[in-house]
Amino acid sequence: MSTVLYRKYRSTKFSEILGQDHITSILKEAVRSGTTAHSYLFYGPRGTGKTSTARVLAKALNCPNMKGGEPCNKCKTCESITKLKYLDLIEIDAASNRGIEQIRELKERINFSPSEGKYKIYIIDEVHMLTTEAFNALLKTLEEPPEFTVFILATTDIHKVPSTILSRCQRFDFKLASNNSIRLKLQKIADKEKIEVDDKALDLIIRSSKGSFRDGETIFEKIITDKKIAADKKISVEEVKTILGLIDEDTINSVFEYIKNKDIKASYELVESISAEGQDLYQFILQIIEKAREETNSIIMDGKDSFGITIADYMHIIKLFTNARVELKTSAISQLPIEMALTELILFNGELPELSHSDKIEKQSVVKKIANIVKKKDPETEEVKLEKEVSKNVSNGVVSLKELREKWDKFLKEIKPFNHNLAAFLMYAELSGIQDEEVEILVPFKIHKKKIEQKRSKDILSEISKKIYGNELTYSCIVDKAVLSRKQKQRKNKDEVVMVDAMKEVFGDMIVEDS
């Protein structure tokens, strides 16, 4: 099996460690002058060179041919450490060995002299994962270590390391790698692997690595293992986009054009298209944020803008899509956070009206009415309360389509506190007919049909129907893409007040009408 790239091209001396000169220069001088400490703490983001630096330090301390603080990389000691076969280099993964037993075992062996070199080196990776008991045991060892022992602790989360441990270590803060540093590393690998890389393709890889050497090397390896690239020994921009699942730049630009032109219909259709194609919506959001940032910087630095959008608008885009990125992880409907962000940007210029105090109180009282449907509380108690609430509206008559439409806005408003997503999807539904207490509604996409016809949704719709219409109605959906365009046309033909009333059903009582 071939060695993975990040191991194959791991730095073997201080001069090869890129982007951390503020650390390597100090360590190299300490080795040269013989003033090294007994315990170090390397902290910073993953893939920035903490473990590589620890191994180089272990080499430099034990290399018999050390010169100017650098290991020779030719002697038996250096070769053994490179191959991780050196007896006096002990690496512990605290994420897997986090208990006190492992630290006790370390304490029992620590007083034995080195077998081969001058120093016995202990590298404890992800040290913040140790248990409290393990940290206490380690503290005793760090307080009085044997003179031939050096501890190198590494962590991505220094805030979880006890202050008592921190105070006994020399600390070094590893920074995210600069784009130039990653470029140098990847170009060096490409040259050694005899692969030609387009500059723009390399830019995409660097951007995707987000300051991590290891991520950059892993992405690069993923790309060069592609059958076509492996045969051609050449990497193009389009191949990188395809392999990394990046959204086409023209598609991202379209989002900003739709925002500028206030085209909500086209923006929704674009999101639906991307989702239907199985593309990564998380990546889609990320690229929108990155594009908005680029355009903001372009305006500030050069006075140039590609879309005729103001800095304030770009700030709204970044804010709303950053929130959408977080909400995407927990949203039952994957497209919904993106659709909500676009709706707020296009129809409300990124700023929803504040929820008034009286509306908050009213909304809180409404939320309690049908809690048994959503929270599954004690059925007997809640059913009695619900029966009292809706009994005054019960009617033995047949509900007409006209009555359905007249009370539809009120119906949607009642749904909102119990299921925000359901209310949002019904906002884009169109009443078609009613027969034998079954309401037929038209929806623009399959995802709307799936959401509305879920059992939990049907339960809520039935109970709200009983309250608003007097009958427990059932609902079935028919997909009709023309619904979306009709809704859009209705909004254009009505004045602004009607538009706000309609969108209220998406955003609930956050929208307050002027009296």
Image (cartoon, helix red, strand yellow):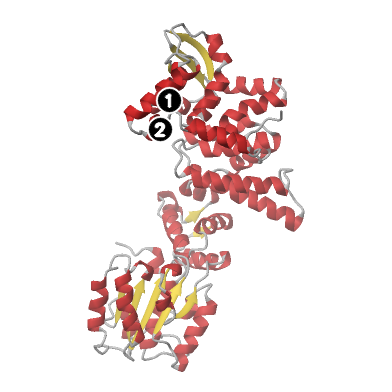
Give the number of marks.
2
Quadrant including the N terminus? bottom left
Q: Front-most of 369 and 293?
A: 369
Sequence-first tag of 1 and 2: 2
Label 2: state its secondary structure: helix
Where is the C terminus found, in terms of image quarters? top right
Q: Is residue 268 left or right of residue 143?
A: right
Q: Residue at x 70, y 38 (%)?
A: 260
Q: Residues within 10 Å of mark 1 (few under 14, many from 20)?
A: some
Image point (50%, 72%), residue name: 174
Q: Where is residue 337? Give x, y as percent.
A: 53, 39
Residue 293 visible to the viewer: yes
Tell me the SS state at disc 1. Answer: helix
Residue drawn at the location 48% of the way across and 15% of the way down: 393
Q: CA distance from mark 1 to mark 2?
A: 8 Å
Residue holding disc 2: 374
The percent position of residue 32, horizontal first and vertical second, equals 46, 91
Reading the image, the residue beneath label 1 is: 460
Residue 280: horizontal and vertical position, in percent? 48, 43
